Amino acid sequence: RKLPGKPRVDENLTLGIDLGLKDFAITSSGLKIPAPRLLRQKIDRLNVLQRRASHHRKGSGKRRKTNLRLAVMYERMTNQRNHYLDFLHQLPPTWYVKTKPPPWSWRILL
C-alpha cells in the first residue's frame, strides 16, 4: 500500500512562533513580544506596604488601613497572575501581519 505524501509547505505563507519565558513569543521573522513582568513591577510597592504594616501598633486604625491596602495589592497581583494572557488583547492586531503576508489573495475576496 502506498502512503500519501506530505503536503508542500509554502514558506511565504507560513509563520513560526516560539513561546518562551524570557520573551513571550518570537516569530520566525524575528519579531519579539516581551513577556510581562508582573511581579517585578509590584515588588517594591509590596515591600513598602509590608514594612508600614509591621511598624504600626497592633489593633490600631492605621494598621488596619495599611493591611487593607496590602490586601488590595495582593488581590491585584492575584488577578494579574490568573488573567496572565489578557495582555494579548492589548497587543496591536498587526503584529502577525508584519511578519508574513496574509494567506489569501485580496482579489479572491473582492
Image (cartoon, rainbow, N blue to C red):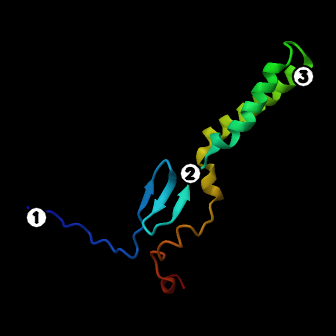
Mark 2 nearby-residue class (10 Å; few <14, some 14–19, many ≥20): some
In the rendered image, which residue does mark 1 sit on? 2
Mark 3 nearby-residue class (10 Å; few <14, some 14–19, many ≥20): some
* First-in-chain label (3 vs 1): 1
Residue 16 position, x and y percent, is: 41, 63
Viewer-side label of 3, 1:
3
Against 31, residue 53 (above or below) is above
User: What secondary structure is marked by label 3?
Assistant: helix
User: What secondary structure is marked by label 2?
Assistant: loop
Label number found at residue 65: none
Residue 105 position, x and y percent, is: 47, 82
User: What secondary structure is marked by label 1?
Assistant: loop
Amino acid bearing label 1: Lys
Amino acid bearing label 2: Ala
The answer to whether the residues at label 2 and label 1 have Cβ atoms under 8 Å apart is no
For this rendering, which residue is in front, 105 or 110?
Answer: 105
Residue 106 position, x and y percent, is: 51, 83
Q: Residue at x 86, y 14 (%)?
A: 57
Amino acid bearing label 3: Lys
Picture quarter containing residue 18? bottom left
In the rendered image, which residue does mark 2 sit on? 35
All told, the count of numbered labels is 3
Q: Residue at x 71, y 31 (%)?
A: 74
